[in-house]
C-alpha cells in the first residue's frame, strides 16, 4: 500500500493512539480545568453551571487560603532538598550495585522492592509505625538538641534529612535502575585506558563516570520532581482534593488551586534544572 510506503507516515500511524489519548485524556481536561478556574461552578440536578468570575478564584486562594500557601511553601522547600538528595543517593547506590560482587542481583531487587510495595496506603502505615526514620535517632544528644532548636533553617533542613532518610532511599528505586542502565552502557575500555594512564578512582569518577551520566541525572531530576509532586503523601494534593466538594469552595476554587500548584511545580523544576545546568557547565570547565 502506498499509504504505508513512507516511514514517517508509519511512525505517525503507530503514535496515533497515543496522540488521540493525550488529546482526549490530557489536553482537553487541562483546558477544561483552566476554564473552571475562571468560573464559579455549581453542580445541579441539570448539570454543571459555570458563572464567569475572572481571576476571583485565584484572588481568593492568595488572600483566604493560608493553609494552602503554607503547604505550597513546605512542598517547595522539601522538593528543593529531597530531589537532589534522592538523585545523589541513587547515583551512589547505582555505582555500588554496578560493581561485580556476588549477589548483586539480590541487592538490586532489594532496592527496587519499595517501588513495588510502597503504595500510598502502605507508606501511611509504615510512617505511622515510624519505620521510615533512622532507629534510635532520639538517643543521640545532638539530635535532641536540634529538635529543641527548631526554627533555624539549617537545623530544620538537617532534621528533615535525618527523619526522612530511609523514606528518601525508598523513593530512589527507579532512579537507581536508570543509573545502572547508563553505567552498563559505558565502554569498559575507557576505564581500562584511564587506569593505564595512571588515573585514580576519584579522577575516573569525575572525568569519565559523572560526565557520562549527566543526561541521566537530568532525566532523574525531572522524574523525581514529578514523582514527588504526585506522591500520595503530598499534603498539597490532599488539600486540593479536600476542597473539591466543599460548598464554600467547589470545582472553580479547586481548579484555581490546581493551576497555582502546577505553576509552583514548574517553577521548582525550573530552578532544579537551572542548578543542574550550572553544575554541568562548571564540571565541563574543570
Image (cartoon, helix red, strand yellow):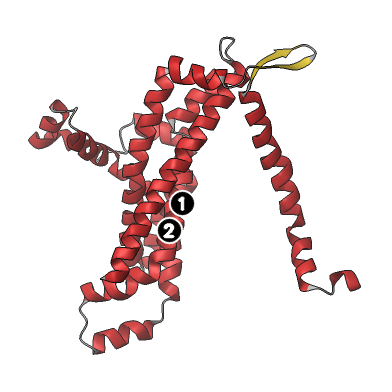
Q: Secondary structure at mark 2?
A: helix
- x and y, in percent, of residue 215 in the image: 44, 64
Residue 71: mark: none
Residue 235 position, x and y percent, is: 43, 28
Q: Which residue is mark 1?
A: 222
Q: Position of residue 245 (x, y in %)?
A: 60, 16
- Of 32 and 185, nearer the camera is 32
Which residue is at a point 76% across and 53% down the rendered structure image? 17
Nearer to the camera, 187 or 6: 6
Residue pushed farthest right?
1
Residue drawn at 38 percent across, 34 percent down: 75
Quadrant position of residue 28: top right
Q: Residue at x 34, y 53 (%)?
A: 275
For the N terminus, the quadrant is: bottom right
Q: What residue sits right under mark 2 in the picture?
A: 218
Nearer to the camera, 102 or 189: 189
Q: Given contact means CB atoms under 8 Å apart, are the residues at marks 1 and 2 in contact?
A: yes
Quadrant into which the C terminus falls: bottom left
Image location of residue 56, percent across then percent down: 56, 18
- Secondary structure of the residue carrying tag 1 is helix
Amino acid at each position: 500500500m502506498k499509504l504505508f510506503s513512507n516511514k514517517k507516515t508509519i511512525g505517525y500511524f503507530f503514535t496515533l493512539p497515543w496522540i488521540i489519548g493525550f488529546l482526549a485524556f490530557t489536553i482537553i481536561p487541562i483546558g477544561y480545568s483552566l476554564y473552571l478556574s475562571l468560573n464559579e461552578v455549581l453542580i445541579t440536578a441539570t448539570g454543571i453551571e459555570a458563572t464567569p468570575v475572572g481571576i476571583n478564584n485565584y484572588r481568593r486562594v492568595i488572600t483566604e487560603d493560608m493553609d494552602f500557601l503554607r503547604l505550597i511553601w513546605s512542598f517547595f522547600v522539601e522538593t528543593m532538598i529531597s530531589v537532589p538528595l534522592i538523585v545523589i543517593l541513587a547515583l551512589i547506590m547505582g555505582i555500588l550495585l554496578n560493581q561485580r560482587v556476588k549477589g548483586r542481583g539480590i541487592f538490586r531487587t532489594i532496592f527496587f522492592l519499595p517501588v513495588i510495595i510502597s503504595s500510598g496506603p502502605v507508606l501511611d502505615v509504615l510512617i505511622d509505625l515510624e519505620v521510615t526514620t533512622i532507629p534510635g535517632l532520639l538517643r543521640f544528644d545532638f539530635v535532641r538538641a536540634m529538635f529543641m532548636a527548631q526554627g533555624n533553617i539549617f537545623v530544620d533542613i538537617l532534621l528533615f534529612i535525618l527523619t526522612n532518610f530511609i523514606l528518601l532511599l525508598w523513593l530512589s528505586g527507579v532512579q537507581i535502575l536508570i543509573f545502572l542502565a547508563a553505567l552498563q552502557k559505558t565502554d569498559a575500555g575507557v576505564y581500562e585506558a584511564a587506569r593505564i594512564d595512571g588515573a585514580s578512582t576519584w579522577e575516573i569518577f569525575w572525568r569519565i563516570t559523572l560526565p557520562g551520566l549527566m543526561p541521566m541525572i537530568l532525566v532523574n531530576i525531572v522524574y523525581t520532581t514529578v514523582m514527588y509532586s504526585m506522591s500520595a503523601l503530598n499534603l498539597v494534593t490532599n488539600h486540593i482534593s479536600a476542597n473539591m466538594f466543599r460548598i464554600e469552595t467547589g470545582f472553580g476554587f479547586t481548579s484555581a488551586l490546581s493551576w497555582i500548584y502546577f505553576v509552583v511545580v514548574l517553577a521548582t523544576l525550573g530552578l532544579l534544572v537551572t542548578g543542574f545546568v550550572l553544575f554541568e557547565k562548571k564540571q565541563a570547565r574543570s
